[in-house]
Image (cartoon, rainbow, N blue to C red):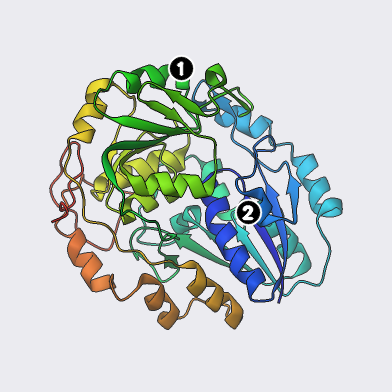
């Protein structure tokens, strides 16, 4: 097939999972024209493995002192630039399929030219009945559906709420050298001048830190004290590299991160302790953290303090959520040329080790907060608890 494939760079999770999918497609002989947009100043993680690709500015979050500014994000969108790229700069070709990992240019190009399209992203899950959704403003709800529209929009989630919901994309990670005293830290939207002294005050642990830039209001970043890499006491600074990141994720028993969906999924799949500090003002991250707490996958913190981190690191380990490596099966399904996600493929994606009945049963024992009226799910929540990781500890 001749495939137009788009990836948003607003989050490394999109780049990571799509890099795996694109690699499989190319290995199987498909012609893939790749478009990456968003965060124009950001270095594309593992760019060499993705080349060749077209790079566009796209849409990006505007940062204001560690908080997403909705007004600044809208003002910086530059819709006329987007239209210019869409009409005159997008790669031309006779495409059989367009795939968008929430990348708007690819989605709208396919819509304009009548190309069959498939989208997949956690944000799409909010479109379907039975899926918990965040409280959102009208223009935010519009983005769920219309920022990157596709003929079939597959949501990604931790639970099979709907037939158009698929599980997270998890790459195999070696955990044989896991160390209880090692903690992975990924807080790219937070000011390291604030959280680094907090981490340094927690004794007896080694913190491996990625994404430690100081961001300006455009989302551009510089490294603090030239700590692009190196060590200072118990703090170990690393540059962004997907291979190294996965190796460190496998070695660390605990993870402290902003509430991006992909890293939370990877940590939960390995039974890591997980402390989520959502990027303030970004409704998906705020909802992810709340939902992960509700499902017993993580603890949630609005601010980081030494005692919060100490209590988190003393918590029990959790039983891993046994998600499979989904990318090969997803490519198999793309190759069928189907316009729907059939029942057999959906069941295969969720896997024999995690059938819907068993998953629903396991969720029934979780202590969860009450749902807001907007958050109706297919199962009954248990009595509320205030904080903590309540899912059954690993044996």
x 56%, y 42%: residue: 139
Q: Nearer the viewer, residue 107 or 130?
A: 107
Viewer-side label of 2, 1: 1
Residue 76: percent from the left, percent from the top?
68, 31
Q: Residues within 10 Å of mark 1 (few under 14, many from 20)?
A: few
Residue 394: percent from the left, percent from the top?
17, 54
State which quarter of the image contains the C terminus. Answer: bottom left
Query: Does residue 25 appear to the left or right of 157 in the view shown?
Result: right
State which quarter of the image contains the N terminus. Answer: bottom right
Examine the image and state in which quarter residue 380 appears: bottom left
Circle 1 sits on which residue?
A: 193
Which residue is farthest right? 88
x 56%, y 55%: residue: 145
Residue 108: percent from the left, percent from the top?
71, 57
- Is 334 situated above or below 190? below
Q: CA distance from mark 2 to mark 1?
A: 31 Å
Please tell me which of labels 2 and 1 falls first in the chain.
Answer: 2
Check disc 2 and report its element: helix, strand or loop.
strand
Circle 2 sits on which residue?
A: 7
Residue 244 circle label: none
x 65%, y 39%: residue: 43
């Amino acid at each position: 097939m001749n495939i137009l494939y788009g990836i948003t760079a607003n989050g490394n999770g999109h780049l990571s999972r799509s890099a795996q999918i694109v690699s499989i497609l190319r290995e199987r002989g498909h012609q893939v024209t790749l478009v990456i947009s968003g965060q124009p100043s950001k270095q594309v993680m593992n760019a060499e493995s993705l080349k060749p690709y077209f790079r566009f500015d796209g849409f990006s979050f505007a940062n204001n002192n560690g908080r997403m500014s909705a007004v600044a994000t809208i003002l910086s969108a530059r819709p006329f630039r987007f239209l210019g790229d869409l009409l005159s700069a997008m790669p031309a070709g006779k495409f059989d399929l367009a795939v968008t990992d929430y990348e708007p240019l690819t989605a709208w190009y396919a819509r304009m030219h009548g190309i069959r399209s498939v989208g997949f992203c956690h944000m799409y899950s909010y479109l379907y009945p039975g899926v918990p959704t965040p409280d959102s403003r009208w223009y935010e709800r519009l983005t769920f559906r219309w920022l990157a529209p596709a003929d079939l929009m597959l949501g990604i989630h931790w639970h099979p709420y709907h037939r158009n919901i698929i599980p997270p994309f998890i790459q195999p990670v070696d955990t044989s050298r896991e160390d209880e005293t090692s903690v992975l830290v990924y807080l790219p939207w937070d000011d390291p001048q604030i959280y680094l002294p907090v981490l340094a005050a927690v004794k007896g642990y080694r913190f491996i830190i990625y994404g430690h830039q100081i961001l300006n209001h455009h989302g551009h970043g510089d490294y603090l004290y030239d700590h692009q890499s190196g060590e200072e006491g118990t703090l170990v600074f690393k540059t962004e590299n997907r291979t190294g990141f996965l190796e460190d994720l496998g070695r660390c028993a605990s993870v402290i991160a902003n509430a991006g969906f992909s890293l939370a999924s990877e940590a939960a799949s390995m039974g890591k302790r997980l402390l989520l500090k959502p990027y303030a003002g970004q409704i998906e991250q705020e909802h992810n953290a709340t939902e992960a707490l509700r499902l017993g996958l993580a603890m949630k913190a609005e601010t980081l303090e030494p005692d919060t981190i100490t209590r988190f690191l003393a918590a029990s380990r959790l039983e891993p959520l046994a998600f499979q490596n989904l990318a090969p099966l997803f490519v198999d399904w793309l190759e069928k040329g189907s316009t729907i996600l059939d029942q057999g493929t959906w069941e295969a994606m969720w896997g024999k080790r995690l059938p819907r009945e068993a998953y629903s049963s396991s969720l029934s024992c979780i202590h969860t907060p009450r749902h807001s009226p907007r958050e109706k799910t297919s199962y009954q929540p248990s009595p509320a608890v205030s904080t903590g990781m309540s899912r059954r500890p690993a044996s």
